[in-house]
Amino acid sequence: MKAHVHITLKNGVLDPQGKAISNSLTSLGFDGVEGVRQGKFIELDLADSDAEVAKARVSKMCEKLLANTVIENYTVEISES
């Protein structure tokens, strides 16, 4: 199984990288971009055969290591390899 984890900053948390990306896009002529929030994407190959068990395990991984849950949100998607 594969797990796809998307990690983003919570609303209200300053995103200096997103601001830098937004400024760069504007300077390159890409007008109309009103806001940019950047995040992380992590792909995990798992030996689990049960999707619900896999999702629970990956959620624990996020809570303990992959995401800083004080300032970040995460979503987990499980798919067959």
Image: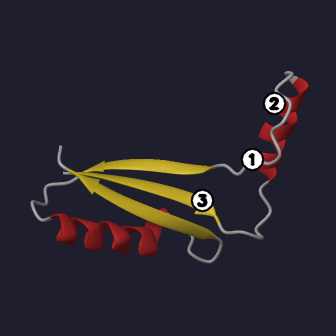
Q: Estimate the x, y position of residue 73 in percent, counting from the top left.
A: 56, 68
Pointer 3 or 2: first along the chain: 3
Question: Is label 1 in contact with label 2 (beta carbons under 8 Å)?
Answer: yes
Residue 64 percent across, percent down from the top left: 43, 74
Please count the marks in the image: 3
Disc 3 is placed on an element classified as strand
Between residue 75 and residue 70, name the one nearer to us: 75
Picture disc at residue 76:
none
Who comes first in sequence, dot 1 or dot 2? 2
Residue toward you, 45 or 4:
4
Please name the residue that numbered disc 2 is placed on.
25
SS type, badge 1: loop
- Which quarter of the image is occupied by the C terminus? top left
Residue 66 point in image, percent of width and height = 46, 63
The residues tagged by marks 1 and 2 sit, at their Cα atoms, a distance apart of 10 Å
Q: Is residue 57 left or right of residue 10?
A: left
Q: Which residue is mark 3?
A: 8
Q: Residue furthest top?
A: 28
The label shown at residue 36 is: 1
Q: Amino acid at mark 1?
A: Val
The image quarter containing residue 9 is: bottom right
